[in-house]
Each structure stands twice: as structure tokens, then as C-alpha cells.
Amino acid sequence: MRILFLVHSFNSLSQRLYCDLTARGHTVSVEFDVADSVAEEAVALFAPHLVIAPFLKRAIPASIWSRHVCLVVHPGIVGDRGPSALDWAIREGESNWGVTVLQAEAEMDAGPVWASAEFALGRRKKSSIYRNEVTEAAATAVLQAIERFQAGDFVPRPPGREARGRLRPLMGQEERRIDWEADDTATVLAKLDAADGFPGVADRLFGEPCRLFDGAPEARLRGRPGALLARRESAVCRATADGAVWLGQARPERPEACKLPLALAFPQALELPAAPLPGWWRADHPTWQDIAYEEAGEPGRAVGFLAFEFYNGAMGTDQCRRLTAAFRWAATRPTRVIVLQGGADFWSNGIHLNVIEAAESPADESWANINAIDDLAEAILNCGSHLTIAALQGNAGAGGCFLARAADLVWTRAGVMLNPHYKNMGNLYGSEFWTYLLPPQVGADGARAIMRHRLPMTAGEAVDLGFYDACLPGPAAAFRVDVARRALELAAAPDFPGRLAAKAAKRARDEAEKPLSKYRHEELNEMRRNFYGFDPSYHVARYHFVSKSPPSWTPRHLAIHRDLGWVKPV
């Protein structure tokens, strides 16, 4: 079928559905919700069999839904209505939630139901639940709805009286407001979790209004409710009525301000007492930490697991440097294999565009950041003492995809979305040694295709292309167990010494043929032009990305109905 996506943006859920549907032979074109007339023109050009709205913030025009079947993906259980579905579910402690695919009609979220899927709702950030449980449920429900649509004999029905959902209003800041004197830690975290990603919780820090994001519990520190107690790296600890929470991100309510690690958004935080973790490598601290390490296995054949939970997968200069130091430390341990676990939602998305945008000199910070991430990639590539595994339980984009490829093996979870291209960010050339790492995996033609391709890639597709090594099924918890088992088997295998020797020999041959320093120099020469050259495309694209500027048009690689070669079907 020809399926038109109407979207507010091409977010992770939209990308997952796009890949799932194109893999099943459907032709999918995308139109951003710029204006009713633009959407109407897209429908006229594409003549779709079906219109789907995976992520839309306003109603589909009646001029479209009255003439075409339009399916809306709503992140709520059957009967749920309103724009803050997931927010209310988290705030009210729902144990189960779901996704409903319903037909667009005059009344928002009230149309007949084509399919639905439910999931257990744990206590986590809204953005994390959306990227994981909501996305998986949406994939299941949308595929079922399409099968029913194609069968032609399914009659969608309005939600019945047995539906658990109900109409709930937009959750405003008054409902989100934290009363630091009265709210306990669980309440504070629920409010932060329900607002994570967008819109954040309106509050004040250092006498200035701001939005707060990224809360985490603290088990030991205590103080007067509302008081700022301590700082760890870029996060700040604040007392609640019965304990304390860590605040990782903030966006000051200033013109042009963006969401930043809190201590960068408010430099006054650097004056708070430091609260470093004793034995930072332990992963069982009941507190906030963005880098953790643990070991498993018998002496002499053990595995080290290095996790790095960076918000939204963005890796700033300081984070890259700390992770590089942690990796080098892990390489001194009496282990055989190092697993680079990344975080639950993202493995890495590369350089930190928000931090760069907020810097006094974005060009200089871009240069420092790309060099810091290259240092990390080089440390992984030159690790001769261990076999290294990048285990992607979460999504990866741009430089993060190639940073993962610096490891000896890359294992990724089925359902993970990859965007291994730089061009969408103002035609960035890219670094992280991609010119060294990519061609041997996929060939010269394959490398050119991946770098020119601006569309998302599934984990399975990456393995089929030879870019990554294995796609492991199951949810995140099962993936971590499977990775640990496989890594321990690798460390205990009789051929381990031979594999390590073969790795060293290959690295020596490659170095003799063309040193890593030359690859890095060539890539960074191109990046220098992006950062400091006369073409401002990267800086313009970064500004619009960080400021979340409303789209004024749909990128042509998504809107195939606007290609000059597109012929409207008869």
C-alpha cells in the first residue's frame, strides 16, 4: 500500500513504524504538519491508501479524514482521551498502560478503535517509556490495524463502556508544580518523570525561573526541604520532605536558553559542596551516577561491564573525557572482555549539540567535543589487552553508531533504531574514525550508501548489511542477560588467546598500511570546515535542532511524494 505519515516530527516512534512498514513492502511517504493546506497537497500528490499519524500534536483536518481513512496512534489505553495521556498515567501510578490506534473523526481521540496493545507501566521517565514500551506497543497495534484494513472486513468500533480510559485535560504546570516543603521523594520523582522530555517542571533555581528534567533518587543525603545540598559532576541534589533527589537537567527561562546539564545551565551550582561517589565503579549505588562499572565471571576469565547513562545519548566534552578515563581504567582490570553497555534509552548520539549551542564559541566547543569523542574511539580501537563489545540496548545516532563500531564486536537489541549518518546536521562530514571502520564492514559502495542515506536503520538491517555483528531478540532486561552470557562464554572460550592475538596482528597491519592518526587528521580537516568554514549549514541546523524550531517544510528524502520524478498513481 501507499501509506502517508502525517507527523509533528520524525521522532523515534515514527522512525520505527516507518522501518517496520517499508520492510513489509509498503511505500511510506512523510509530511510534516506545517499547515492544513500542506497536508491536503500531500494527500493529493501521493493518493495514499491509508493515512497514519504516529506523532501529531493537533487534529487532522476534516478535509482529509472525511475523505480518507486516517489512523491516529494515541499513547493511551482504549477510551483514554486528551493530550497528556502518558503524563497522567505516570502521575497517578497506573500499573498497566497501552497504545490505541483509532480512526480520526471530528472529536479528538474519540474515533472507532482499529487496534490496541497494553504493557506494564513501571516507575520511569516518560521519555524512556515512550521510546521503549510505547514504541513496541505502537508497532504491534499499527501492524494489526493495517492487517485489518487490508483484509477489508473489519469494522472498527467506538470504545465501549467497559473501556478503562477516560477524557483527561492537558496537564498544566499547576498540576506539575513541586511543593518542596511538603512533597516526599516519590511524589517529586513522579512529577519529574511525568514531565521528562517535555515540558519539564516549572520551578526556580538560584532565584531564577527554569524548567527541571531528569530526576533520580538519593538515599543518603538529607537537608532542609527545598535546599540545594550538593553537586556531582553536572547534577545537583535537592532535599525533599523526606529525603532528596538529584536533578540532572534544567532549562532557564531566558530567551534562547536550551536544556542543559544543570551545572552548565546554572554555573552557581559549582559552588555547592562536591559529593563524589566512593568507589564510583560500583553499579549498586542508590543515587545518581552517569558512569558505572561491574565485573562478573571467574578470575582469569572475567568480564567488565562499563555503563554510561548520558541524558538523551548526548556526550559532551567532559563526559567523553571521563568515559575515556573510565575505559582506560577498566582495561587495567584482570578481565578478558569489556562490554560497553551505554544507557537504557541510548547508547550514544555523538557530540552534545545543546552544550555546543550554549558555548561562548560553538565552533571551539564543537572542535573540543569531536576531539574528545575521537580520543575515546581511539582508546577502544587501540585496546590490545581485552576484546571489546559494544552492547546497544538503546538507540544510537550519528557519531554514536561509529563509536560503537570501534569495538571488536557490536551486538544490538532488536527494536533499536540507528541513524548512522551526519548529513542531516548541516552536512557534517563526521569523524569517530568512520572512514577506517565502515568500508571493511560493508565495502566502499556500501559505505557511500550509508553515509548518503538519511533514513533510519533497524538493528536487523545493520546486521544484514554487515555493519554490526548480531541482533539479539527480547526486551532490554533479557538483552542484558543474553549479552552477559555471551560475553562470559567468549571470555572462557579456549580460543580466546588466539582471538586476542589475531586482533593485535590485524591492528598492526592496518596501522602499517595507514595509521589511525592519518584517518583522524583527514576526518578532522573536513570537520574543521564544518565548524569554522564559510558554509554555516551546521550551525544553522544545530540551532534549529536545539531550539526545536517548528518545521517549515518536510525534508525531501522523507517526502517522496514531492520528488520531481514521482508519478501520481492512476
Image (tube, rainbow, N blue to C red):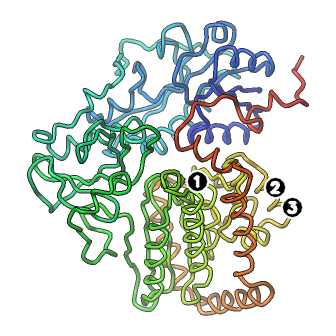
The image quadrant where one finds the C terminus is: top right
Q: Is residue 381 placed above or below 469 in the rendered structure?
A: below
Q: Position of residue 190 (x, y in %)?
A: 26, 40
Task: Answer with left or right where residue 401 lies relative to residue 429.
Answer: left
As drawn, the label of residue 414 is: 1
Marks 2 and 1: which is nearer the front?
A: 2
Task: Answer with left or right where residue 89 lies relative to residue 228.
Answer: right
Q: Could you tell me the amino acid type at mark 2? A: Ala
Q: Could you tell me the amino acid type at mark 1? A: Ala
How many numbered badges does the structure rendering display? 3
Q: Is residue 364 placed above or below 20 in the rendered structure?
A: below
Asked whether the beta carbons under mark 2 and mark 3 sit within 8 Å of each other, the answer is yes
Q: Is residue 513 placed above or below 208 in the rendered structure?
A: below
Q: Position of residue 189 (x, y in %)?
A: 25, 44
The image quadrant where one finds the N terminus is: top right
User: According to the image, label 3 marks what residue?
Assistant: 445
Q: CA distance from mark 2 to mark 1?
A: 22 Å
User: According to the image, label 2 marks what residue?
Assistant: 449
Tell me the element at label 2. helix
Q: Position of residue 133 (x, y in %)?
A: 45, 42
Q: Residue at x 34, y 53 (%)?
A: 262
As drawn, the label of residue 492 is: none
Closer-to-camera residue (235/290):
235
Tell me the element at label 1. loop
Closer-to-camera residue (110/384):
384
* Label 1 environment density (alpha carbons within 10 Å; few <14, some 14–19, many ≥20): many
* Label 2 environment density (alpha carbons within 10 Å; few <14, some 14–19, many ≥20): few
Q: Residue at x 54, y 37 (%)?
A: 548
Earlier residue among tags 2 and 1: 1
Marks 1 and 3: which is nearer the front?
A: 3
Q: Is residue 186 placed above or below 479 in the rendered structure?
A: above
